[in-house]
Amino acid sequence: MEIQLYVYDLTNGMARSMSRAYLGIQIDAVYHTALVFDDIEYFFGAGVQTCRPGATHHGRPMEIIPMGTTQLPLDVILDYLESLKDVYTPESYD
């Protein structure tokens, strides 16, 4: 199964164009990432969330990075992600 990393800029380019004027330093982006496999995007927001690839409220990914493949069965991966829901709750998002 192919794994991809979707990289988003939460500012949609505003950090790159305005950070130096407002902060005195250049910030290229405010990054958010998600993993995509088996045609589902997995990300942390209000807990562990899923959606169709590229359909999050974060807009379009600024970059898609191939991460390689895994031989793990999908049910093992999904069980692991389910276990993370107890740790990565909406209250733990920072």
Image (spheres, helix red, strand yellow):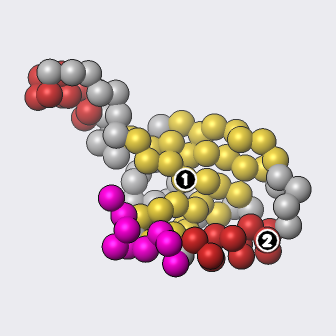
Report the residue at 56% width, 46% height from top.
6
Which quadrant of the view contains residue 40? Answer: bottom right
Please report whichever mark, 1 or 2, sits nearer to the chain's N-terminal start.
Answer: 1
Q: Can you say whether 17 is above or below 66 in the image?
A: above
Q: Is residue 43 magenta?
A: no
Q: Residues within 10 Å of mark 1 (few under 14, many from 20)?
A: many
Instruction: State the extent of the magenta-drawn residues as a range.
Output: 86-94
Residue 79 in view, yes or no: yes
Question: In what element is the residue under mark 2?
Answer: helix
Q: How many other residues sit within 10 Å of disc 2, few (<14), some (14-19) or many (≥20)?
A: few
- Residue 9 position, x and y percent, is 38, 41
Residue, disc 2: 76
Q: Main secondary structure of the magenta part?
A: loop
Task: Say whether residue 59 is left or right of residue 1.
Answer: left
Do tag 1 and tag 2 residues touch (Cβ < 8 Å)?
A: no
User: Viewer-proximal residue, 29 or 79?
Assistant: 79
Between marks 1 and 2, how big is the CA–CA gap?
Answer: 19 Å
Q: Which amino acid is tagged 2?
A: Val
- Is the residue 18 above or below the residue 7 in the image? above
The x and y percentages for residue 75 are 79, 74
Identify the residue position indicated by label 1 in the image: 34
Residue 61 appears in the picture as rendered: no
Q: Is residue 25 above or below residue 35?
A: above
* Image depth: mark 1 or mark 2 in front: 2
Q: Residue 88, image x and y in percent?
A: 47, 69
Q: Judge from the rendering whether residue 16 lies leftward or rightward of residue 32; answer left or right.
A: left
- Residue sitting at 59 percent across and 39 percent down? 64
